[in-house]
Image: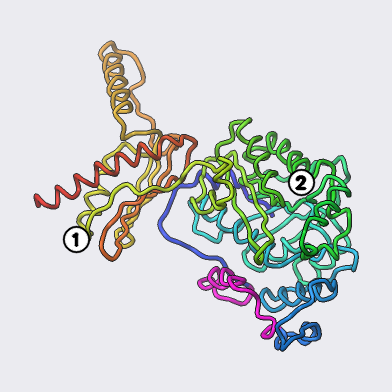
Amino acid sequence: MAENASSRAQQRPHAGVGTGSHRDLARGPKDAYFRSLYTKAPDFRAMALNDPEFAAFIKGRGRDLNFSDPNAVMQLTKTLLKVDFDLSIELPEDRLCPPVTNRHNYILWLKDLLDTTSYDEPGRKAVGLDIGTGASCIYPLLGCAQRDWSFIATGDLECAENNVKLNDLESRVRVIGRKPDDALIPLDDLKMDCIDFTMTNPPFYESTEAMLESAAGKSRPPFTACTGAEVEMVTEGGEVGFISRIFEESLVLRERIQWYTAMVGFLSSLTKIVDKLWEHKIDNYAVTEFTQGNKTRRWAIAWSFQPLRPAQNVARGTKAALSRNILPPMTETTAFKMPLRENIGGFAENLSNAIAALELVSWNWNKEKLEGVGRAVDKVWSRPWRRQKKREAEMQMNKEMDGGGNTEKPSSEAQVCRFGFKVAVRVARDHVSVEARWLEGHDEVALESFRGFLKTASEKAVEDLKKA
């Protein structure tokens, strides 16, 4: 079930953009379908027409639902899963009834995280671990409904396994039990080399008192409070303590998992986890927020020991983090803008040639899309690099003149990429811009340095067109 995520991260780039697939949808429209869900409040009246069992709970001309009624909340979850994802679940009355929209947001973010940190086409196969899946097993179910993913899930064995069987997903979802002292990430126990991601939605509170105090401070009961058992809401150390255990294990496993992720209920928890990343000099991470309705807000954190960087909207998806200075480095920038002119193709070709003239590991330019992907061993466009290469060439020449030294040059394909990038020429209504995206590496200074090169190269490309 597992594939080698680390080796995939080092694959060479190729052109093209791909998509995944829903159970009954063609590969093309899949993402658009799922991303359109819950952009507006659910239409209870339309849902009632599609599901008679939900209609029994609707009042007030088919628009109102009593959220203080656990049975109504349970049926809402079942109906959303049935109508929007073709999924079914059964839950005991004393277990958490998960809000579908919130869980769906987590899956959407995971898809973006994987899609934007790979040289493969979006929608690739992946293997994930849901730590503490709960009785519903909702995350693996939602993930499998939207993508060709497989899951290991740890948690409530009997209920979770029943829901997996209910949806005929036994070949893709494996539910395993864990003891309190077992590793939260059981790769070695399962004899698995690596997987693509972990996810968890841990209990928020460190004590029953903290949970009750939080509930007392709310203007109305939380969406699922009426159906959650204490074991699902309280854990030693709260959510920070739980995620810290995962973090400590990640320091050992490192690149064997591309992305370690977690959802938290408090912004303060997000800040504490980011502090741990900085403490251990982990620079590749992402933060975001999920909004459910007008009040409920959750946050998520992801970190990686691999070099592939997420898109900017994926990595910096929360405005709340601005005031706390916890956002990761920028990964996208505009290097150049000019008024819209004729012969944009000629300008783009000149710019591509300037990039190709650099000493790169690879450079692939798509003339139709006016964009290209490149990989470099370092800041090869910079003056320090050119001076260093000149010194190395002189030293090599001296060795050859003395009759010693190795005269063979290493193959560019064997060189390590320290800066992967994408360059795109974008045409708007009244202007043309050159956009740069940081794809790979750990040197955040490289993006700004590359931006300066692109600006100079773009200006020269314009001048060359004028001379032609």
Mark identifier at residue 239: 2
Q: Is residue 143 visible?
A: no
Question: Mark 2: which secondary structure?
Answer: helix
Which segment did they paint magenta?
Answer: 23-47
Residue 314, percent across and down?
Answer: 54, 53
Question: Mark 1: which secondary structure?
Answer: loop
In the picture, measured across the screen, residue 272 lies left or right of residue 408, that is: right
In the picture, measured across the screen, residue 375 lies left or right of residue 217, that is: left
Residue 111, percent across and down?
Answer: 58, 58
**In the image, residue 105 lies in the stretch drawn in magenta:** no
In the picture, measured across the screen, residue 68 lies left or right of residue 86, that is: right
Query: Mark 2 and mark 1: span between their CA atoms?
Result: 55 Å
In the picture, measured across the screen, residue 138 lies left or right of residue 93, that is: left
Residue 43, percent across and down?
Answer: 65, 80
Mark identifier at residue 4: none
Which residue, given by chain and number where applicable, does mark 1 sit on?
A: 341
Q: How crowded is mark 1: few (under 14 residues within 10 Å), some or many (20 or more)?
A: few
Above-or-below relation of 453 to 296:
above
The amino acid pointed to by label 1 is Arg
Q: Earlier in the sequence, mark 2 or mark 1?
A: 2
Q: Is residue 319 visible?
A: yes
Quarter of the figure with residue 284: top right
Residue 291, percent across and down?
Answer: 63, 61
Residues 193 and 370: in front is 370
The amino acid pointed to by label 2 is Glu
Question: In the image as oriented, which residue stretches furthest toward the top?
Answer: 402
